[in-house]
Image (cartoon, rainbow, N blue to C red):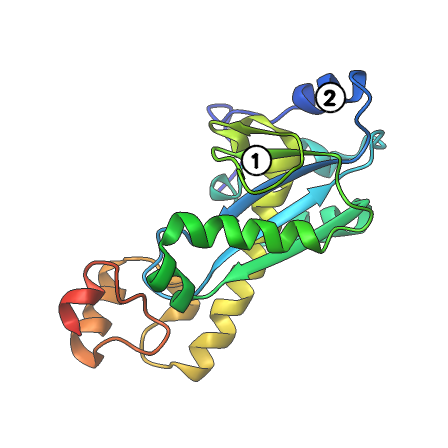
Amino acid sequence: MGLSNNYKIPSFAEEKKLEAQGYQLIAGLDEVGRGALAGPVVAAAVILPSKLKKTRWLTQVRDSKQLTPARRELLSQHIREIAVSMGIGMASHKIIDNRGIVTATRLAMKRAISQLSPPPQYLLIDYMRLPESPLPQRGIVDGDCLCFSIACASIVAKVARDHLMVELDKIYSGYGLAGHKGYCTKEHVTCLNRLGPSTIHRRTFQPVKYLI
């Protein structure tokens, strides 16, 4: 899959506005795995340098869903190399079932933020807000498509979760986790019907809860 002109290109507009207000350490946050039937929800927080040397890979950054796995891998490595700070947080399938996906997603984000050193001064978050955090913040609808820092976080989170699901596939074989990464595909549902849910499937999600 190439980089279609139909896709929105994330920019530094939000970061530049905040830098003009005196903020220097601005973290972009995004999550992945929110709609999956198995495994954790994973969040990434990324603080980028205020000045980036122009390189070709910067022009390739998009929302992770718009990129091929190979391109995500390459971009994730570049982002890790140039980031001022980066953190990854997770919330397990048990937390998702016990506390709900929204609470679990916020917990994963807070865990990602806690790994940032130096800590952020401002948060730019895809879609949602973190009411428990004292940090100034903004939730941006389609932030992973519009905001460069959030797009970078979406790529890092996606690659991290994909790697985890490949490893979990070795433990929970037969479900095809390495391929569909726990999402609700036809193959996944067929495997669920044949094998029943594993211990990492989300029991509060359909169609898993009907198979318990």
Residue found at x 74% / y 48%: 78
In the image, is residue 161 above or below residue 43? Answer: below
Quadrant where the C terminus is found in the figure: bottom left
Residue found at x 53% / y 38%: 131
Q: Secondary structure at mark 2?
A: helix
Q: Is residue 206 left or right of residue 71?
A: left
Q: Is residue 6 left or right of residue 13?
A: left
Which amino acid type is shown beneath numbered disc 1?
Ile
Circle 2 is placed at which residue position? 18
Residue 71: x and y, percent?
A: 60, 48
Which residue is outermost to the left? 210
Q: Is residue 160 left or right of residue 85?
A: left
Circle 1 is placed at which residue position? 125
Q: Is residue 100 visible?
A: yes
Considering depth in this image, is 41 or 121 the residue closer to the camera? 121
Question: How far apart in space, not on screen, are marks 1 and 2 (Cα)?
Answer: 14 Å
